[in-house]
């Protein structure tokens, strides 16, 4: 199939928004911009359309999708109840990069929830995303618009690199502002539990909810046979083709380690401004003191690494684990398949 490209920079570009929305209404797949990453959208109420998402991405069938809405009221038919805590979270962080897991109603096809009795819901803040949901007239199920396992797409170019010819259209609205995916929190249990760190930090969540639990899968690989609360967390993810290893230590220690271990097939993923100090080819992913910039650039830096010729091993600087950096750390840890060297 030929993938159409719609350049849409404003929610008022009604003609193109309507054309993309029509594809969605008719059961097609459209990659859409959000403030976090590009999503591969389909009508969330149409199981057959949603099944196409899994096929296009090569996504494991047991990994459920996030349902995107454009107004708060749209959550009601999708879930059994909207607890007080969900209202508080929505007040504080919607529209924005927060996904809330709640008990689902039968309106949600099993393709979306992948057999779970919950559904993940989020209201994106990107004005074009919301205009598309509104025009489609249905909630949109959308995982990140990458091939399953590869780094999430933060530009329409990334989407096309992975999925051109496999999806009906992509809406190009430029680069994503946040750059890592939404925070996923579940309210389906007794105590709110963070399943995936993202654009909203644990500190921000606790300011609204009080103490929350952090799922073990945020920091570590699930042990064999264990079923994680968020199925997506069990897969190797975001990976460049080269072997990525996180090296934890200060800058001089890091440089020293790379110097000793490097071959002609080694590259480095480091903070912006450190490239010149590295003994091998280095890609920057934002300044050390600027976690928002790190988040915004991480995935495209991982894709840049793939574009370097002959690279087999990549040593990465280790992000902090607080604030927005926790999301950056979590993604890098998965890209490295949990391989960390402590100096
Ligand atoms: O920012 C984002 O969240 C982006 C944009 C497109 O909205 N979407 C995204 O979707 O990152 P995806 O499919 O790549 O990641 C969704 C995550 C997965 O880890 C999945 O397992 C989890 O959310 N998830 C979805 N539904 C769930 C549910 N009912 N219970 C627990 N986890 C769920
Ligand atoms: Mg994803």
Image (tube, grey):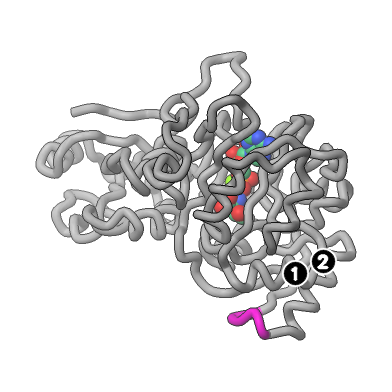
- All told, the count of numbered labels is 2
Q: Which residue is disc 2 drawn over?
A: 137
Q: Give the extent of the magenta segment.
A: 7-12
In terms of image quadrants, where is residue 20?
Answer: bottom right
Q: Residue at image x 66%, y 84%?
A: 12
Labelled pair 2, 1 in contact (Cβ < 8 Å):
yes
In-front residue for pair 305/152:
152
Q: Is residue 161 above or below residue 171?
A: above
Q: Is residue 46 visible?
A: yes
Instruction: Please give the name of the residue rendered at 78% of the width and 60% of the height, measured from the top-left corner.
Output: 29
Circle 1 SS class: helix
Q: Residue at x 87, y 46 (%)?
A: 47
Counting from the top left corner in percent of width and height, residue 73 is at 73, 57
Mark 2 residue crowding within 10 angstroms, few (<14) / some (14–19) / many (20+): some
Name the residue tied to disc 1. 134
**Where is residue 21, by image quadrant?**
bottom right
Q: Secondary structure at mark 2?
A: loop
Observer-nearest of 82 and 10? 82
Question: Residue 186: x percent and y percent?
Answer: 59, 35
| In front of the other: 279 or 249 | 249
């Amino acid at each position: 199939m030929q993938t159409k490209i719609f350049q849409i920079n404003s929610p008022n570009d009604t003609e193109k928004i309507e054309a993309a929305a029509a594809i969605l209404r008719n059961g097609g797949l459209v990659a859409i911009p959000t403030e976090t990453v590009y999503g591969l959208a389909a009508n969330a109420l149409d199981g057959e359309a949603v099944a196409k998402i899994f096929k296009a991405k090569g996504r494991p069938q047991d990994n459920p999708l996030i349902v995107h809405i454009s107004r708060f009221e749209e959550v009601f038919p999708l879930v059994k109840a909207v607890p007080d805590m969900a209202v508080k979270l929505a007040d504080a962080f919607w529209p924005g990069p927060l996904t809330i897991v709640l008990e689902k109603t039968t309106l949600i096809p099993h393709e979306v929830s992948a057999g779970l009795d919950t559904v993940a819901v989020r209201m994106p803040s990107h004005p074009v995303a919301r205009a598309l949901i509104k025009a489609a007239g249905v909630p949109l199920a959308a995982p990140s618009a990458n091939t399953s396992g590869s780094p999430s797409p933060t530009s329409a170019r990334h989407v096309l690199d992975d999925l051109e010819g496999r999806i009906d259209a992509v809406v190009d609205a430029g680069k994503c502002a946040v750059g890592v995916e939404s925070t996923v929190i579940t309210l389906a249990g007794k105590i709110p539990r963070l399943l995936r760190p993202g654009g909203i930090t644990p500190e921000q969540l606790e300011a609204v909810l009080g103490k929350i639990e952090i799922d073990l899968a945020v920091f570590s690989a699930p042990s064999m046979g264990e079923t994680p609360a968020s199925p997506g967390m069990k897969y190797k993810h975001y990976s460049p083709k080269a072997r990525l290893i996180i090296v934890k230590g200060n800058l001089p220690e890091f440089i020293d380690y790379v110097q000793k271990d490097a071959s002609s097939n080694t590259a480095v993923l480091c903070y912006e401004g450190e490239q010149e100090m590295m003994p091998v080819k280095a890609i920057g992913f934002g300044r050390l003191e600027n976690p928002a910039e790190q988040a915004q650039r991480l995935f495209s830096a991982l894709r840049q690494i793939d574009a370097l010729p002959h690279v087999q091993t990549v040593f990465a600087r280790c992000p902090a684990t607080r604030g927005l950096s926790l999301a950056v750390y979590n993604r890098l840890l998965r890209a490295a398949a949990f391989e960390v060297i402590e100096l």
